[in-house]
Image: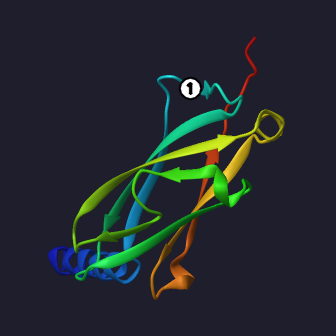
């Protein structure tokens, strides 16, 4: 009776985990060496590393944007649209550059990750923006 109950419990747990599994995982981390840079133009730049894992069984395309900073503030290494093969993980480097007055007023903003064809699975990842005027 105990073994039967344990098997039923573990089967239910497995079914629950498969049913609630997200189609992708992500993390947003700020590159902290240095924490921020004041460019010769006066702009403040923060760098972020986004790790994205496609947990589906097909290639998926993801679109990146941001909320809380101007659209032209994001500078991607290649593109803001990334194709990730099934079961693979990619790392994306993103620079966020803001003019000094905007940088000092911006404490947080959101990276928005949208899988193509699955807008309801869009996620907002909160990120902190560090700034301090030098000189």
Location of residue 69 with respect to 98 vertically, above or below:
below
- Give how far across and how far down residue 94 sits, in percent: 49, 48
Relative side of 104 to 61, left or right:
right
> Residue farthest to the top?
135
Relative side of 16 to 59, left or right:
right
Which residue is at a point 23% across and 72% down the rendered structure image?
85
Judge whether residue 72 can be spotted in this image: yes
What is the quadrant of residue 52 in the picture? bottom left
Which residue is at a point 59% across and 27% down the rendered structure image?
36
- Give how far across and how far down residue 62 sits, in percent: 43, 72
Q: How many marks?
A: 1
Dot 1 surroundings within 10 Å: few (below 14), some, or many (20 or more)?
A: few
Split into 4 quadrants, where in the image is the C terminus? top right
Closer to the camera in the image, 124 or 70: 70
What is the quadrant of residue 20 in the picture? bottom left
Closer to the camera in the image, 69 or 54: 69
> Residue farthest to the left?
3
- Give how far across and how far down residue 49 sits, in percent: 43, 45
Location of residue 64 with respect to 58 vertically, above or below:
above
- Give how far across and how far down residue 63 sits, in percent: 48, 71
Judge whether residue 22 can be spotted in this image: no
Relative side of 48 to 19, left or right:
right
Which residue is at a point 56% across and 84% down the rendered structure image?
120
Which residue is at a point 15% across and 75% down the rendered structure image?
3
Residue matched to label 1: 35
């Amino acid at each position: 009776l105990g073994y039967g109950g344990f098997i039923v419990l573990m089967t239910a747990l497995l079914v629950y985990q498969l049913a609630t599994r997200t189609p992708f995982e992500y993390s947003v981390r700020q590159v902290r060496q240095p924490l921020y840079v004041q460019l010769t133009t006066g702009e403040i730049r923060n760098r972020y590393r986004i790790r994205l894992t496609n947990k589906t069984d097909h290639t998926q395309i993801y679109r990146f944007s941001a909320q809380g900073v101007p659209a032209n503030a994001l500078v991607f290494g290649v593109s803001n649209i990334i194709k990730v093969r099934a079961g693979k993980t990619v790392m994306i480097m993103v620079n966020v550059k803001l003019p000094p007055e905007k940088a000092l007023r911006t404490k947080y903003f959101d990276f928005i990750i949208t899988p193509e064809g699955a807008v309801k699975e869009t996620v907002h990842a909160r990120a902190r923006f560090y700034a301090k005027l030098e000189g």
